[in-house]
Image: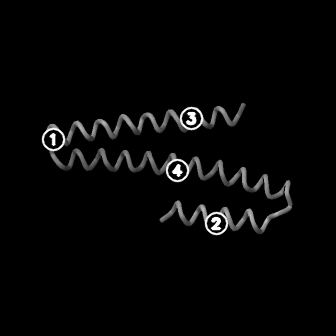
Amino acid sequence: MENINKTDNVIKRLRRIEGQIKGIQRMVSQNKCCPDILVQVAAARAALNKVGGIILENHMKDCIKNSVELEDNDQELDKLIDTILKYTK
């Protein structure tokens, strides 16, 4: 049940971000001033980073739980490090 709530939360956030992106597209097509557009781009970027952080946090918790249960800590830890490095690039 908890995993469904996490998924719903991420989907809601992504839909809001989608709305932000569509708003930015409208602003560009309507030739709104650049500083206003850039503020919205920064807001959308921050929202997307937040979603990525939530997904990464959930992944880390699942990996740690799985590695403890499987007692395969090194391989799971390597996968987790690889994921973090890819996410932060």
List x then y, in percent, for residue 62: 72, 50
Disc 1/disc 2 C-alpha distance (Å): 42 Å
Kind of residue indicated by mark 2 = Ile
Of the numbered discs 3 and 4, the one sitting upstream in the chain is 3
Residue under label 2: 81
Instruction: Using the image, determine if residue 49 lies above or below residue 32.
Output: below
Instruction: Using the image, determine if residue 59 lies above or below residue 75.
Output: above
Residue under label 3: 9
Please name the residue shown 33% across and 40% down the image.
21
Of the numbered discs 2 and 3, the one sitting upstream in the chain is 3
Residue under label 1: 32
C-beta proximity under 8 Å, tags 2 and 3: no
List x then y, in percent, for residue 70: 85, 57
Q: Quadrant of residue 20?
A: top left
List x then y, in percent, for residue 28: 19, 42
List x then y, in percent, for residue 15: 44, 34
C-beta proximity under 8 Å, tags 4 and 1: no
Residue under label 4: 52
Circle 2: element type:
helix
Circle 3: element type:
helix
Instruction: Using the image, determine if residue 84 lies above or below residue 35.
Output: below
Of the numbered discs 1 and 3, the one sitting upstream in the chain is 3
Kind of residue indicated by mark 3 = Asn
Circle 4: element type:
helix
Mark 1 vs mark 2, foreground winner is 2
Disc 2/disc 3 C-alpha distance (Å): 25 Å
Q: Residues within 10 Å of mark 1 (few under 14, many from 20)?
A: few
